[in-house]
Image: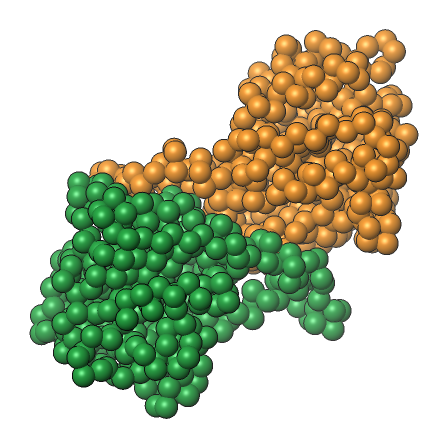
Chain colours: A green, B orange
């Protein structure tokens, strides 16, 4: 079990004995974050970014870490989330392996990694710890909370549990809860990891690592993150050259699309902790914003007390279908919020907010200008 | 390695030393089939049904085997493919494990099962052996060839290679070739089987069987066969009762949709040979009707010499998207065929032709009435 901590990550220690929503406490836990741009004297230009399942807090390059971040084109000087104007805080989720305490972190009670002994993780824990970071940085109110994918869930949870923290919200490809197709996808991803004999009930090490399970889990993810139409344009039915197929095992890759999946899944498997993946993945299945309102997510949205929101998604997203973003917009509107709902015609599927900055950037910039 | 042969299957022996398209020959090979309804004296009421990857030749119940078939509501007396009128021949694909010779069959050269020594399978081999069965049954011309899913591919191949065999065609949720998303799905299904240590390079037995790999492969299939919308209606976010979760492994099923997938995948894993799955799955990736026309599938369709065709698909199909059925219709039309293209609004995804007989049956019956 290993953590993968960006070099410029900073940390906020959680209170000793931090109580998790579903039981269990954490001792000596911390949350990793990075900031971009300067907090102004009035301390009113802070924007919080909550991420999807896998990203770290390094959203973009900055002097302390010039490597490109996961949202490089979106966050930065002159970019849609303009760090010449905004003080951007990106928080790594509790339970991750990118600096925040998670299953790959050392349990001070045992001196070994938590593994499956990590307490059950909930989206509410991720939201509460992110809110704790904001306050610990001396910020009473954010100008906006921005959440993407899983971060769209954790930000809705944060709005519900910490209503004083912001009045404005951008939700990109998020949802109030997971639908059965997404649950099935994630269940199968977890099964791929759990079925790998090297997983060993979560007690793997570098010499016994569930690499094949991780590869399959990631490939399945990629198949649902991108759209079929995009792959058709990119790969068509192009085959690998005979040289690239040489010496491969029976039924090994024969088409470009298979090789593409291999390459990217291999990269992922080398920098994400399998147990962390299991905990975060399950926590996405479990979350339901409606839980706080007797199961009525629409009612829960209407009670969030948001003033302004931008909600975006893409028609080609099969994991968080665009109808789920429409639901968010309608729920917020019914609570009196001024909401712009913008379905985007992008071929990039669920990943569009990451890769299609041309379509997602301008509306985000325009929205932020109205809350400046 | 095991075969799973329906009790009423009949067999046609292939010629000794049957040469496979991509090299290799089969000795003592046979094709399993079943027939439904009576061949008339003019021998002109025969309809050939070519199946998807997994079904056997038992399309429907009949006196010799009263168990329901895989297309029970479609084939039978008074059903859309009315066996009071038609003599229906359903052929089990070469390479399957349901009676036709495949990787689980005995190689007379060694006395053991072929396993991975089975010659590379192509859709053209499946088409040629089906045509051989038809002729061996004394039928010179079919009234219609009906293909579903993979059978939509093998029937197009049959039309191209045996143009004298029929003038009418029904293609349900078929395609001229696989798109990269479908290739990726099947590649990952094969990877799940190949990654299972019990697969042992295809040399498993009943005591060492790649069950977990088969479960994952099937679940991934089911996720692409049905549509997300259907699951939302059927399962929503319903959880398993605490009793049903008792004693399960960490990260085991928690939602109804997970349990549903478990149940059906387990059933499949117990009645399909893993190596057979690998060969048939790869052969679907490889097939391209355009190969016979320098890669131009549209041109290949226009040359099929078909008189009448019905082409159907569903908007909710993500594995064989409906645009692929439109392509088939347009290609056949450009060759002068009288083609009805009927996209169906069914929530049942790729499986709609199997389960949504209400929508698929009437157009099929109507089309067949015009070729009687």
Q: Position of residue A88 (x, y in %)?
A: 30, 76
* Of A163 and A364, the residue lying toward us: A364
In the image, what residue occupies the spot 68% across and 49% down?
Answer: B178
Residue that appears at 84% across and 45% down = B299
Q: Looking at the picture, how far across and down is residue A57, in whole percent?
A: 32, 76
| The furthest residue to the left | A16
- For the residue pair A4 and A303, the one nearer the viewer reads as A303
Q: Residue at x 80, y 36 (%)?
A: B332
Quadrant (top left/top right/bottom left/bottom right) for the C terminus of chain A: bottom left
Quadrant of res B202 = bottom right
* Quarter where residue A20 is shown: bottom left
Q: Quadrant of residue B7?
A: top right
Residue A8 in sight from this viewpoint: yes
Q: Percent position (x, y) of residue A157?
A: 22, 57
Dividing the image into 4 quarters, which one contains the N terminus of chain A? bottom left
Give coordinates of residue A87: x percent, y percent: 28, 78
């Amino acid at each position: 079990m290993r953590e993968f901590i960006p070099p410029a990550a900073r940390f906020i220690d959680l209170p000793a004995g931090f109580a998790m929503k579903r039981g269990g406490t954490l001792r000596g836990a911390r949350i990793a974050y990075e900031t971009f741009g300067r907090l102004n004297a009035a301390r009113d230009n802070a924007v919080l970014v909550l991420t999807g399942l896998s990203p770290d807090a390094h959203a973009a390059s900055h002097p302390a870490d010039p490597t490109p971040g996961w949202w490089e084109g979106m966050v930065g000087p002159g970019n849609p989330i303009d760090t010449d104007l905004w003080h951007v805080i990106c928080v790594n989720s509790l339970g991750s392996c990118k600096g925040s305490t998670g299953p790959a972190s050392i349990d001070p009670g045992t001196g070994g990694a938590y593994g499956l002994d990590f307490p059950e993780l909930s989206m509410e824990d991720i939201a509460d710890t992110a809110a704790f970071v904001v306050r610990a940085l001396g910020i009473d109110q954010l100008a906006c909370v921005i959440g993407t994918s899983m971060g769209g869930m954790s930000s809705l949870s944060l709005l519900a549990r910490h209503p004083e923290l912001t009045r404005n919200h951008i939700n990109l490809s998020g949802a109030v809860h997971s639908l059965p197709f997404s649950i099935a996808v994630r269940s199968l991803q977890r099964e791929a990891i759990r079925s790998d004999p090297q997983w060993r009930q979560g007690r793997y090490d570098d010499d016994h690592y569930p690499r094949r399970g991780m590869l399959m889990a990631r490939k399945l993810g990629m198949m649902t993150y991108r759209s079929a139409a995009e792959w058709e344009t990119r790969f068509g039915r192009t085959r690998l050259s005979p040289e690239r197929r040489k010496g491969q095992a029976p039924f090994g890759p024969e088409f470009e699309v298979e090789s593409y999946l291999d390459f990217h899944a291999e990269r992922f498997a080398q920098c994400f902790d399998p147990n962390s993946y299991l905990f975060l993945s399950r926590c996405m299945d479990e979350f339901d914003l409606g839980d706080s309102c007797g199961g009525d997510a629409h009612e829960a949205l209407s009670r969030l007390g948001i003033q302004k929101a931008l909600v975006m998604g893409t028609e080609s997203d099969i994991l968080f279908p665009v109808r789920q973003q429409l639901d968010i917009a309608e729920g917020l509107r019914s609570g009196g919020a001024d909401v712009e709902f913008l379905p985007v015609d992008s071929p990039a599927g669920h990943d569009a907010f990451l890769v299609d900055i041309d379509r997602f950037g301008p509306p985000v910039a325009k929205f932020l200008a109205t809350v400046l």
